[in-house]
């Protein structure tokens, strides 16, 4: 079992940004639409779509919105063709940033992302400059007795369990296994607080308070862009510093 990581406090930060519900629903709809277009509209046979739909439901997105997004993806309703892209760069403190885009206008998306980096005194890197630092993984936040979570999750195919404190554990899976592991945990009576497919860094970079403020402002400005679906980073900010900085960003 790996040691403590910062996933829980990253999720805490994201909770603040998710308050913009209308914008959040639009981004979730894009994810559902693209997943349905690429793998079909049946969640039983499209794990990417299943994860996107579950994420939307956990964010209280109305079922009608979800169904319309699936139909747009499968072609049953008129929709927009979105391009997927990844932008890479380094932020304050030498932290790597890996930015996921779904857009109907690549030029606009590039301009917006580059502008956010420039305003923070940072710059975009070449393709491949930071992407190799990250791996796509499923992450389940589960609360309960350590032994119950470990035995159930590992038996269901989880790759790792990380202790985040206060009986909260991060269960790491292959992206294709997240649904099966989540179901196994729930059937064992474990409380699953969230599940998502994300990009996890192989290592982290410590960030001091001064750079933390600049970095979080940059991440916030990127996440506020309509085309940005996710901003992944390898920062390591001490919990006390994080709580202090969150009140100032």
Image: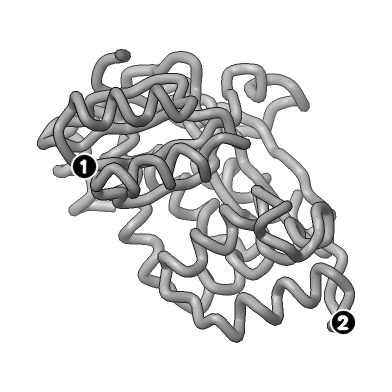
Residue 122 can be seen, yes or no = no
Q: Residue at x 60, y 73 (%)?
A: 26
Q: Would you place residue 59 above or below residue 154 in this image?
A: below
**Kind of element beneath mark 1:** strand
Q: Earlier in the sequence, mark 1 or mark 2?
A: 2
Q: Residue at x 49, y 42 (%)?
A: 120
Residue 161 can be seen, yes or no = yes
Residue 187 percent coordinates (x, y) = 34, 47
Residue 205 percent coordinates (x, y) = 39, 17
Residue 164 percent coordinates (x, y) = 22, 30
Structural crowding at the residue carrying mark 2, measured as other residues with C-alpha within 10 Å and reported as few (<14), some (14–19) or many (≥20): few
Please tell me the numbered disc located at residue 172: none
Please tell me the numbered disc located at residue 78: 2
Please state which of residues 147 and 164 is positioned toward the viewer in this rendering.
147
Locate the N terminus and report the quarter of the image it occupies. Answer: top left
Task: Give the CA distance from mark 1 to mark 2.
Answer: 41 Å
Circle 1 is placed at which residue position? 143
Residue 230 percent coordinates (x, y) = 56, 48
């Amino acid at each position: 079992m790996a040691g403590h990581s910062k996933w829980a406090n990253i999720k805490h930060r994201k909770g603040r940004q998710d308050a913009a519900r209308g914008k959040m629903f639009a981004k979730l709809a894009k994810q559902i639409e693209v997943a349905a277009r690429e793998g079909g509209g049946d969640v039983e046979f499209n794990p990417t779509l299943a994860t996107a739909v579950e994420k939307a439901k956990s964010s209280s997105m109305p079922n009608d919105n979800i169904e319309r997004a699936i139909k747009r993806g499968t072609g049953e309703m008129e929709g927009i063709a979105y391009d997927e892209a990844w932008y890479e760069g380094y932020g304050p403190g030498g932290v790597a940033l890996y930015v996921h885009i779904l857009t109907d206008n690549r030029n606009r998306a590039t301009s917006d992302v580059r502008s956010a980096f420039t305003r923070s005194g940072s710059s975009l890197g070449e393709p491949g400059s930071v992407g190799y630092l990250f791996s796509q993984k499923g992450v389940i936040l589960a609360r309960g007795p350590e032994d119950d979570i470990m035995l159930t999750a590992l038996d269901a195919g989880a790759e790792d369990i990380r202790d985040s404190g206060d009986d909260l554990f991060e269960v790491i899976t292959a992206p294709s296994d997240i649904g099966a592991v989540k179901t196994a945990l729930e059937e064992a009576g474990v409380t699953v607080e969230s599940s998502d497919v994300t990009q996890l860094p192989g290592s982290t970079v410590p960030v001091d308070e001064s750079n933390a403020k600049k970095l979080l402002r940059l991440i916030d400005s990127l996440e506020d862009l309509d085309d940005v679906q996710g901003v992944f980073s390898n920062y390591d900010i001490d919990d006390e510093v994080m709580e202090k900085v969150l009140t100032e960003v």
